Structure formats: structure tokens, C-alpha cells
Image: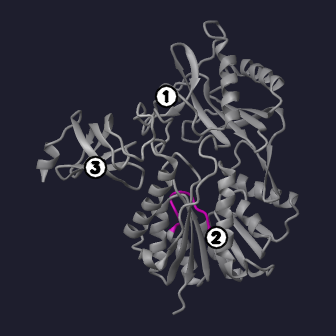
Amino acid sequence: MNKIKNNYEVGQKLEIQIEKIVFGGEGLGRVDGFTVFVPMSVPGDKLEVEIISVKKSYARGLITRIIEPSKDRIEDLSKISFEDFDGCDFGMLKYEKQLEYKDKMLEEVLTKIAEIDLKKVKISKIIGSDKKINYRNKTAEPFFKKNGIIQTGFYSRKSHNVFSAKESLLKSEIAKVIIDKFLQKVNSFAGTKKEFKVFNEVNNTGFLKQIMVRNNEKNEVMIVVVVNKNSQYNQLSKVLEEIYDENDCIKSIYISVKTEQNNVILGKNIHLFGSQYLEEEMEGLKFKIYPNSFFQINKKQALKLYDVAIEFLNEENKNTDKIYEKTVIDAFSGTGTIAMMLSKNIKKVIGIESMESSTLAAKLTSYENFIQNVEFVNGKVEKELPKILKRENVGAIVFDPPRRGIEESALKSVVQNKIEKIVYISCNPATFARDVKILAENGYVLKKVAPVDMFPQTGHIEIVGVLEKDDV
């Protein structure tokens, strides 16, 4: 058993042919039957790789040289690393092939985890994005200093080391312009007594932590600069005032003072200039976006996703003006986008959300859009869902959980109340498949699955599935 492990060691170089891409986005190849996973590789690539870790049954290696590229790889062969592609783990693939491999990864997950017979489920081809790059309407980048110059960048894979992107594949064009202007301003103090200090997370010193730029479809911009303390607050405020005065597109500016050490980006948000929010429109609904607000980062693809979910929910009446007469629950409702979009064809919608700020934003948005048939409940889904199911005539539930999926207790309450239909929106096919298996073991049948490419250039897949109670 140890022979395979001992044949390979960290630092060793191997030649390998990549066979396929597995869920998670890494390529898989074999050397004398031993499996090696290689990030940024493409099926059909013949590569030289350097082993970076060895386990009992597999190893991981990084590309050191492309010996012979796959026909599915982009033409620029100088790019071989995660950093070369600005942190985009599918950037090495031609876009049509990104979609093709995402379809294959989804089928593999459904087969292996959910144990689904693919012949019995209608799985649509993934819905591609018209915009392949620069589609993000929200960008957050940490500051770092190199050769005395303050820059922004991305965290390297599985690391807190920051690197600067050679080109911007994902953030919007306007965000790139604004961040570049901000960097010019703060670097103008370099070498002086007023030089800005960059945060060091090892010893918790320094000032500048991150910059977040949000923009709407009109290219109106919100800037939030995250800082560690108040030491250079007044100086930063003056810099931001200059930027605000010089750029008509900037509508809102905040400083966020973040002293806690955790994975949350923002701290105490202090509004400085302009409006307190950006306004965005979606299907005729107007949303106010504050620094902490959740809003889909790829609006056009989000609309496609929601359209599929709404069609799955009410497909019996999709070509009529007939109203769905039972109550529908939007579980993990966030700022209420789906609930309010559903409200046009549903008698009553109840949204459940654990974050109080998101619930308050949803209530305000529904009020401002004159929507009266939506109710929002603040609390954890697993606690609030059983209560609602006892008092309401619920016909269907839309789940849109975080990556960890749905708590089993919430799924049990669905089963116990024999809910007719479940529409499940997921950003993680693995937990989707796990939850589908639990529901299938309790009398539900997965009817349809539709993947949507919300995040081009990355290995992420967003999916919508519909399950119905099997009455047989």
C-alpha cells in the first residue's frame, strides 16, 4: 500500500496526460496508474508538473511546462498558473469548453452523490453568459505593498499571500478605473511622513485593509475603503473627497473601520460623501444597495436564473395569467429579490432570512415597490420553516441556501408536511446532490435541473432543480 506513495515525493517532476476535469475544477491525470490532480490543466494537455503534495492514493502537482497543449486550451501558452489567470481557475479554457466541462462536472456530481439515473431527469445544457469577462458589479481587493508601492490584488490559492493581477478578467471596467485612481492618490504620499501604512495581518498593524467597489448597470459607483483603525482616517477622508469631486460617476463613499480579525470584510461603516446607497433595477423592481447589501454580482445571469426558478415553480400556468393560490415560501430569502419577483403570480409569498439587515432591506424594498402580498420573517430557516408550515397552506418552497446547503431538520419538516413542490437554487452542486438524495429517500422525485453560468472563467456552477412529491 505504501509503495505508490513512496514512488513520488514533493518537488519531483513528472510528465502527465490530463484525462478529465473533476468537480472543483482541477484536471486529473495518471502516471503508472497513480492519480495526480493538476490545477489549471485541460483534458488533452501533455504537461510537465512538479509535485507539491503526496497522499496515500493521489498527489497534486503544478504545471511547470506545457509540452503539448489541448485543443481546448486558449492560445496564450505563457499562462500556466492560478496567478497568471488572475485567480480564475477556468481561465485557461476556451469559453465554449468551459460550458461543456461544467455540464460534465454537474452530471458526475448528480450521479455519484445523489445517485441519480440521468435518463430519468431532464438536465438542460448550461445557460451561457453573453458577457464572458468584466461582469462583476462588486469587487473587494486587499491592499499590499511591493517595492514601496501600494497595490491591490487577490489572495493566492489556499493562502493569505496577495498577488497583483496582470489583467482584470472579472471586475467591471469602471471598478478598474476607480481603483487605479485611488492607488495613484494614496501612492502620491510615498516617501513622506504622511505615507499610508498597509495592514499587516500577522502583527495586526497598519491602516489600509481592502477597497470595495460596487457599481450598478448605469456604471454609478460606491467606494468603501476598509481600514484597521483611525490613525490616518482624516488624511484618507481628504483623498476620498478629492476622488468624489473629480468623478461624476461616484455616487457614494464610505470608510469601514474593521478592527476584528475574522473573514468578514466590512466593519463599522461610516458614510462620507454622496448618497448612502446605489439603486439598481431588476424586472421593474428597484433595489437600494448599501455596503452590506447582498445583490447578485452578475445581474444579467441572475435574471436568467430567476426566470428558470419561476418557470419551474409555476410551469402549469406559465402561459396564462392564472395566480398560484397557495402560499409559497422563499427560504434563505436574502434581500427578498426572488420573493418579490415571485409575488407577481403568487397569492402570498413568505421570505425567511437569518440576517436581520437583509430582512429589513427586503421589507423596505417591498414597501417602496408597493408589494403587499409578501411577508418577511427574520430567523433561521430550520427554526422558522416548521412554524410557518403549521399556520399556512403552503404549496411550494423555493430554497436558495448558502454553499453548505439545507439543514436536515428543515428537509424533514418539508417531508413531514408533504409539500407538493420544491424549487432548489444552489451555488454548490455537491450539497445540492446530497440534499436531493435525502429528499429522494423520502418520497420526492427530481424532475428537472437547469445549470446557469453565473461566473464565467471560474469552475463555479449555479443550478436550479425542481422536485415533486411522488404520490404513487
* Mark 3 residue element: strand
Q: Residues within 10 Å of mark 3 (few under 14, many from 20)?
A: many
Read off the residue under disc 3: 29
Front one among 298 and 150: 298
Instruction: Identify the amino acid type marked 2.
Output: Val
Instruction: Identify the amino acid type marked 1.
Output: Phe
> If the image is split into quadrants, where does the N terminus sit?
bottom left
Q: Which residues are magenta?
A: 399-407
- Distance, label 3 to label 1, CA atoms, is 28 Å
Vertical arrangement, residue 37 with respect to residue 161, above or below: below
| Magenta portion: prevailing SS class | loop
Read off the residue under disc 1: 163
Residue lying at 51% horizontally and 28% vertically, measured from the top left? 201
Residue lying at 72% horizontally and 37% vertically, measured from the top left? 269
Read off the residue under disc 2: 398
* Mark 2 residue element: strand
Q: Residues within 10 Å of mark 1 (few under 14, many from 20)?
A: many
Residue lying at 57% horizontally and 37% vertically, measured from the top left? 169
Query: Which sits earlier in the primary sequence, circle 3 or circle 1?
Result: 3
